[in-house]
Image (spheres, coloured by chain):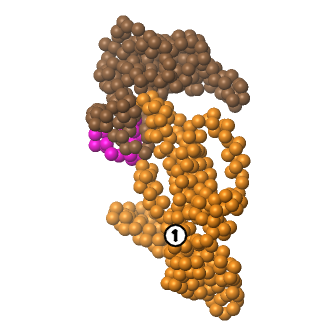
Chain colours: A brown, B orange
Amino acid sequence: MQADKGGVPAIELVDVTRRFVSPTGKNLTALRDFDMSVAQGEFAAVVGPTGCGKSTTLNLVTGLARPTSGEVRLMGAPVSGIDPRVGFVFQKDALFPWKNVIDNVMAGPLFRGKSTAEAERLAKDWLTRVGLSKFLHHSPHQLSGGMRKRVSLAQTFVNEPEILLMDEPFSALDVQTRTVMHEELLNLWSERQASVVFVTHDLEEAVALADKVYVLTAGPATVKSVYKIDLPRPRVVSEIRYDPAFVKYCRTIWDDLREEVETSYRRANEAA
Amino acid sequence: MVEAVLQSNPEYQKALADQEIEARAQRAIRKRRLAVRGWQIGIFVAIFGLWELGADTGWIDPFFYASPSAVIERLVDWAQNGTTEGSLWFNLWVTMEEALIGFVIGSITGVIVGIALGRNPMLSDILSVYIKAFNSIPRVVLAPIFIMILGLGLASKVALAFIMVFFVVFANAFQGVREADRDLIANAKILGASDWQVTRSVIVPSAMSWIFASLHISFGFAIIGAIVGEFVGARFGIGQLISIAKGTFDSAGMFAAIILVMVITLFAEWIMTLIENRLAKWRPQQSIDVQ
């Protein structure tokens, strides 16, 4: 259903290298010769060992960071600065603690010059969709972790992003809440048809959600292999884990990923 | 057997009903509050009682140390008959005016400059050495210069109060900007905020608690600035009253002026707390753990 619409890829990283230079002049390579292509409406997941440079990939797509060499393209055009078509869901929730729920969701439309009335209408609409219409005037600190995540999703989706980037968005949630959030995300996504890059260290999460899973090497990260996940949609995340095909994907990809995890673990031990 | 053990243990209690737990907690809170208040009053009475007693019996010399009753007498006298420099209220107002103007201008410029430099690393790197150097001057030594340049009137005291307030507020605003959460800034930018919108809707609110912490102490600094200015040279004001009292060996007058200043500063502090509580409603309230 979410097949390639045949046009230009929504997101493309072509031969991208990203180095950081520390203030003392030490060179650290986060990404090396990195190639990635996500079609319009496609859901791509990125898995890799901790600290390998997964988040750097996302920062390059948002335009918050620039590649040292190579090119990042959105809908065929090179990225220059922050692109308004991009939405980003952070690992820890990045809600504004001094704003209540509805003001948090209204922030995006207001920043983009919509009228207060219009912003409020959109925000209420999205908060209803994520099931928080009764919590409009609560402060973020009064909500549970799962509810805060829903507000974050509403805050991102209210801008109707064509490109949705998610940086381990559900890693801080408990397992039950996470499964519920997976379902909600897939529902929102299938309505919107956005192109998604979902970074995670949880392989099962990646297989359950994505059309395509990128496995990265231990840092400096480069693409080790790409797996196409041919599980039928719509998927029921809470049940898909018992599907033999799902289990098989997980096992195959894990065999591939394990080597990298072990390398990264060994290096961390050597450094310590 | 387990039951027997539990029953024989006098510490063991059955689970209490909610109401009973709440009632006990309420009682405990009240008891604690009473104890704190009791001690506070006790210490107050002890200190001033001993002072009065000491002055009356001659343990301490009332010529140098006055006595609470003499201080109160002096305050009443000032309030009813005015001071040597005119009405008490006028002198009080003069000091307040100097402190308030210096405080308002100093904190506004402190916030603006702090945020501007905090948002502009290049400028702050360039200016940091000058700020550090200037900051190392004890502010009160500027009083004679200000009085020489600006005269004995309002302007020189305002300038001193301003300088005292400015650096405190500036340093806090600057630090507050630096401590603003990077994810929140990135989030605002991706949601579509311009630089100015990031400053207004992310940087300023997150620096707010730092700024308020500095406003609390800096009103005290504004008063110090005004009074030190008056010490060095003035026609009216509380500092001038203290200075005259010193010149005539009037210790009761000095203590009376000190108490006036204390009351004013406490009052200002209280107002500041009210404002802060209104602005910072989003912060989580701590629940009290009652044993």
Residue at x 63%, y 23% (from the top left corner): A20
Above or below, A2 against B231 in this view is above
Instruction: Let me know if residue B148 is in the magenta part.
Output: no
Mark 1 element type:
helix
Above or below, A263 against B81 in this view is above
- Residue B83 position within the rendered picture, expressed as x and y whole percent measured from the top left: 56, 80
* Residue A247, quarter of picture: top left
Above or below, B39 against B199 in this view is below
The quarter of the image holding the N terminus of chain A is top left
Residue type marked 1: Trp
Residue A200 visible in the snapshot: yes
For the residue carrying disc 1, how many other residues have a C-alpha within 10 Å: few (<14), some (14-19), or many (20+)? Answer: some
The quarter of the image holding the C terminus of chain A is top right
Q: Determine the chain carrying the residue at label 1.
A: B
- The residue positioned farthest toward the top in the image shown: A6
Residue at x 65%, y 77% (from the top left corner): B244
Is residue B99 shown left or right of residue A141? right
Q: Nearer the viewer, residue B138 or B206?
A: B138
Q: Nearer the viewer, residue A17 or A272?
A: A17
- Residue B58 position within the rendered picture, expressed as x and y whole percent measured from the top left: 69, 91
* Residue A175, quarter of picture: top left
Is residue B238 shown left or right of residue A178? right
Residue beneath disc 1: B93
Residue range corresponding to the magenta coloring:
A130-150
Residue at x 36%, y 40% (from the top left corner): A103
Above or below, B137 against B57 in this view is above
Residue at x 69%, y 79% (from the top left corner): B247
